[in-house]
Amino acid sequence: MSEDKLTYKDAGVDIEAAAALVGDINTLRASTESGAKKLFGAFGLFAAAYDLSDYHEPVIVTGCDGVGTKLEVLLRYDALEIAGKDLVAMSVNDILTTGGDPLLFLDYIGVGNLEKEKVRRLISGMSEYLADCSCILAGGETAEMPGIVPDAMIELAGFCIGAVEKPDLLDPSQIHVGDVVVGYPSDGIHANGWSLVRKVLAAHPQDFSEEDVLSLLAPTRLYHDVVRRVREAGVKPRAMAHITGGGLPENLERLLPGKGADLEIPYWENDAVQKVLLYSDDQDRFNTFNMGIGWCVIVRPEDAESIGGTILGEVGAECGVRVKIQTGE
């Protein structure tokens, strides 16, 4: 080869290493296939396929999300497995709100230089969560982009495809005044509100130990167990909500056009989070954080006791969702 000729590897992209990575992660990916849920056809083709013939009237549901600015702190603390779990939960939970089953998940990973071990750890976290909720890691894209993605940074995006029988698809238009809002706890701040958290940490570093920060980095909770419990109780909810950016007010208001609710939520028993709230605006926090409630189910009053969780309040005729929190005293 002429000395003045350049290769793709000279430009910073190692396609042989990228091809080898696919083989390295196949064992992790295969762990997400179990029992009745398997790809239809081979893995590693240009697109993945799933057989929907077990469904009578399948409706496809889709969602995509990322990890947001939490990713910067996760990378700083080398918590790559948590980043993978967050990525899965943010999309899978949205699929679950429809009443559907998450079937396939795909990821996009953008890096400046391919470091196989870092990518493997990300996918390890994804695979663990996907196996927990019986969703298949169907494929994805790892893009090596030197000069575009800084070496210390990673771009992440996740995409989930699910299906639901048409009669089982939840319809929030069926919510009535007097229906009950039931809440389920979060495992922390999850993956929303981190622009504010990062600002608080930067402004008051003396108040947060490494243990505090690691506590704040707890992965987003998967709520497949809650959905399963509701189904096992024989209850079809009016609607379900994943409490992400916008907090309880915004995420519930999208289900309640023309209606509202006055909610009282338990005190958030989390020492590290309470330190963050100490430096957060008293009202803005409700529109930024989940305030300890990561999932809500709206049901008929007679169904509320059978599905566990904490009854937060009732749907009312007045517009808007107002939230107050119980004191910790």
Image: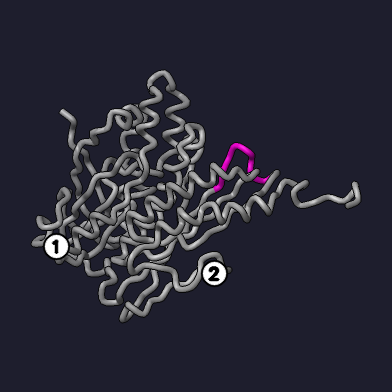
Whether residue 104 is visible to the viewer of this picture, yes or no, is yes
**Residue 111: percent from the left, percent from the top?**
61, 46
Kindly identify the residue that appears in the image at 55 percent across and 42 percent down: 117
Residue 47's label in the rendered image is: 2
**Residue 226: percent from the left, percent from the top?**
23, 55
Q: Quadrant of the C terminus?
A: top left
Kindly identify the residue that appears in the image at 27 percent across and 68 percent down: 170
Q: Residues within 10 Å of mark 1 (few under 14, many from 20)?
A: few
**Residue 97 falls inside the magenta stretch:** no
Whether residue 284 is visible to the viewer of this picture, yes or no, is no
Left/right placement of residue 33 relative to residue 327 reads right
Q: Nearer the viewer, mark 2 or mark 1?
A: 2
Task: Report the number of numbered marks.
Answer: 2
**Residue 104: percent from the left, percent from the top?**
42, 64
* Prevailing secondary structure class for the magenta stretch in the rendered image: loop
Part of the protein shown in magenta: 148-155
Residue 54 occupies which quadrant of the picture?
A: bottom left
Q: 327 or 120: which is nearer to us?
A: 120
User: Between disc 2 and disc 1, whose residue precedes?
Assistant: 2
Q: CA distance from mark 2 to mark 1?
A: 37 Å
Which residue position holds label 1?
233
Dot 2: element:
loop
Q: 169 or 247: which is nearer to us?
A: 169
From this view, report whether residue 29 is shown above or below residue 293.
below
